[in-house]
Image (tube, rainbow, N blue to C red):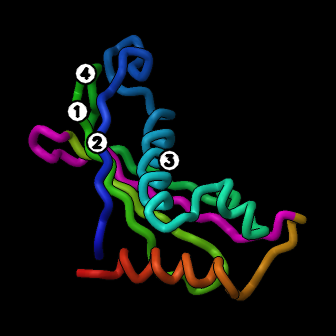
Amino acid sequence: MHWVETESTVRFNEVDEWGMAWYGHYMAWFEVGRMALLRRFDLMPGQMVDLGYIAPVIALKCDFKHTAACGDQIIIKTTVIKPKIAALTFNFEVLLKEDRTLLAQGETTQVLLTTKRKMIYRLSGELEKRINNLVNFCQLE
């Protein structure tokens, strides 16, 4: 499986009073990684709307493994798994850059809807082409 890596720094406003990265920011970091991956395949939210689709998140999971502190350099790894239905499931890992300690791992699932909020069950057209390119890229070893 191929992962896209995005680097960031834990900022002062992202830590709690104990000096640890606040848990909610991990979801924001997942989003940073997801956007970096989607950008490569012209699947940014506005581009999906232009194609007539939206993709709301319907499930999110995060397992915390280790804490991060203000100033820590982190790496956000992102990949997507092959969909069985018209949905996208992204896997994430957040690591300390210095020694690649795993801080958290997680997953989001998004369903694909038309811009009129109708569920789609089968990909087609330009959306299918772009998603297939994304999935094929992530399936590389």
| Residue picked out by circle 1 | 73
| Residue picked out by circle 2 | 7
Asked if the residue under mark 4 is in contact with the one under mark 1, i.e. CB atoms within 8 Å, the reply is: yes
Provide the major secondary structure of the magenta segment. strand
Circle nearer the N terminus (4, 2) = 2
Residue type marked 3: Glu
Q: From the viewer's perspective, tell me whether residue 108 is left or right of residue 86.
A: left
Q: Secondary structure at mark 4?
A: loop
| Residue picked out by circle 4 | 71
Residue 91: quadrant of the picture:
bottom left
Magenta region: 97-115
Asked if the residue under mark 2 is in contact with the one under mark 1, i.e. CB atoms within 8 Å, the reply is: yes
> Where residue 123 appears, x then y in whole percent?
68, 85
Of the numbered discs in the image, which one, if any, rests on residue 31? 3
CA–CA distance in space, label 4 to label 3: 20 Å
Q: Looking at the image, which residue is at 87% across and 72% down?
A: 118
> Where residue 136 appears, x then y in whole percent?
40, 83
